[in-house]
Amino acid sequence: MKYEHIESGIFLARPNRFIAHVRMGDQVEICHVKNTGRCRELLQEGCTVYLERSGNPKRKTRYDLVSVENGGQIINMDSQAPNSLAEEWVLENGRFQDLRKVKREQKYGDSRFDLYVETGERRILMEVKGVTLKEGDTAYFPDAPTLRGVKHIRELIRCQEDGFEPWLFFVIQMKGIKALRPNDRTQAEFGEALREAKNAGVRLLASDCLVEKDSIRIDQEIPILL
C-alpha cells in the first residue's frame, strides 16, 4: 500500500481524537488524524509524524496524519490501512487456492465483517484489526475497550453454523514485534472472547508490517499468545 504526497512535521498537540496540531516549517497545520484511538503512547509532543497531503481543495484540513516515529522506528497509525492490507494479502500471497471472490464489508447477522473471501470450496468471513499498541517487543489489542470487537468475535463463532470459515486477522502496523497478546488489563472481556473463539475453531492470525514513510505492507506472521 502506497501513500502519495507524504510530508513530515513535528507533533505538537491533539485537542481531540479527530485532529492534531503539527508544525511544518514555520507554520502550524491542523491535520486530520486517521485513527480515533487514544494512541497516547505514540503521539508525544515533539515526535516526528508523517502526513499525506490531500488533493481535495474542499477539505477543511489539508493533511492526514498516517504514521509516527516512535522508539527509533516508523509506526503506521492509519486505521483505514489494515483492511486494504488484508485484501492485498489475500489476493497476492497464494494461500487461497481457486480464489473466486474478495469483497469488502460483508454483512452477516448483526455485524458487517471487513472481508468476504470465496474459493472453490470455502466461504470465509474475515474480521481485520489494526494493532498499534506495544510494550517492548509484544503487541497488545485492544488499546481501548471495544464492545464492537467482542460482538464481532461472537458473530464469528456463530457463523460456522451457516457453513462459513471464520478468520480474525490482527495487522500489527510496525516491525520489531515477537508476539501479540490480548490486552486483558484494558478489557478482560475481549481476551475471554478471543480464547473462546480459538477453542471454537475461529482461525486467529497476526502479522507484522514493513513500514516506510510512504508505504506499508504485511510481512511476517507473528504468534498469538492467549
Image: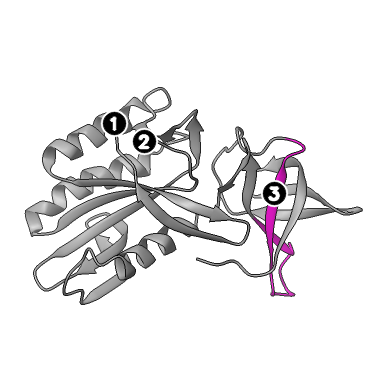
Q: Amino acid at mark 1?
A: Leu
Q: Position of residue 65 (x, y in %)?
A: 66, 54
Separation (CA) of disc 2 from disc 1: 6 Å
Give the label on residue 123, or none.
none
The residue tagged 1 is 225
Q: Position of residue 89 (x, y in %)?
A: 35, 63
Q: Quadrant of the C terminus?
A: top left
- The boundaries of the magenta stretch are 45-65
Dots 2 and 1: beta carbons under 8 Å?
A: yes
Sequence-wise first label, 1 or 3? 3
The local crowd at label 1, few if under 14, some if 14 to 19, many if 20 or more residues have their Cα within 10 Å, is few
The secondary element bearing badge 3 is classed as strand
Q: Position of residue 1 (x, y in %)?
A: 50, 66
Sequence-wise first label, 2 or 3? 3
The residue tagged 3 is 49
Outermost residue to the top? 185
Left or right of residue 157, residue 131 in this image: right
- Give the image quarter of residue 110: bottom left
